[in-house]
Amino acid sequence: MRKNHWRIKCELYAKLILAVMVHSIHQKVHYSTWTIKKKEISFDSLWKYIIARAESLHGAVKKSASEYVAIINSLLPSIIKVCEKYHQPSRKTTLQMIDEMIGDVQHFKIIGKNCLT
């Protein structure tokens, strides 16, 4: 067990920051890929992709935020190619089903305190 609580806090914050950065990348790439190609990006594949390039990304983060952004931007085509989910054409993905259901939502209004129509 580690005795230095500052080191534990530092490691915890580093992991939280990494999680936010990876989630942010996934959200942006996934959204653009879905709107353009109607394809999804695998979070698991993205995580493995980033871990495989951890050393260069870590160096970029240590230099500057703009260096990190430049590297991520240069990796985007590769990220999309490697991390794109493939599915059976006969089955719809969850996002495809949600996309189709959005048009079917019934409109309702609230009348009174606890009544919906």
Image (cartoon, rainbow, N blue to C red):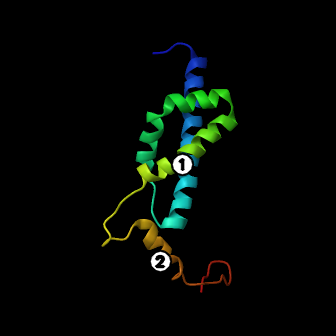
Q: Amino acid at mark 2?
A: Glu
Say if 62 sits above or below 31 in the image. above
Q: Amino acid at mark 1?
A: Leu
Closer-to-camera residue (115/27): 27
Residue for point 64% across, 41% down:
69
Instruction: List the residue tagged with mark 2.
Output: 100
Residue for point 30% across, 73% down:
90
Residue for point 39% across, 67% down:
93
Can residue 42 be seen by looking at this rendering? no
Which image quarter is the N terminus in? top left
In x, y percent, where is residue 16?
57, 35
User: Residue 76 shows which numbered tag?
Assistant: 1
Can residue 56 be seen by looking at this rendering? yes
Can you name the residue that lies furthest to the bottom here? 117
Neighbours of disc 1 within 10 Å: few (<14), some (14-19), many (20+) = few
Q: As drawn, is 86 to the left or to the right of 20?
A: left
Residue for point 51% across, 28% down:
55
Q: As drawn, is 79 to the left or to the right of 63?
A: left
- Marks 1 & 2, CB-CB < 8 Å contact: no
In x, y percent, where is residue 115?
61, 82
Q: Secondary structure at mark 1?
A: helix
Labels 1 and 2: the sequence-earlier one: 1
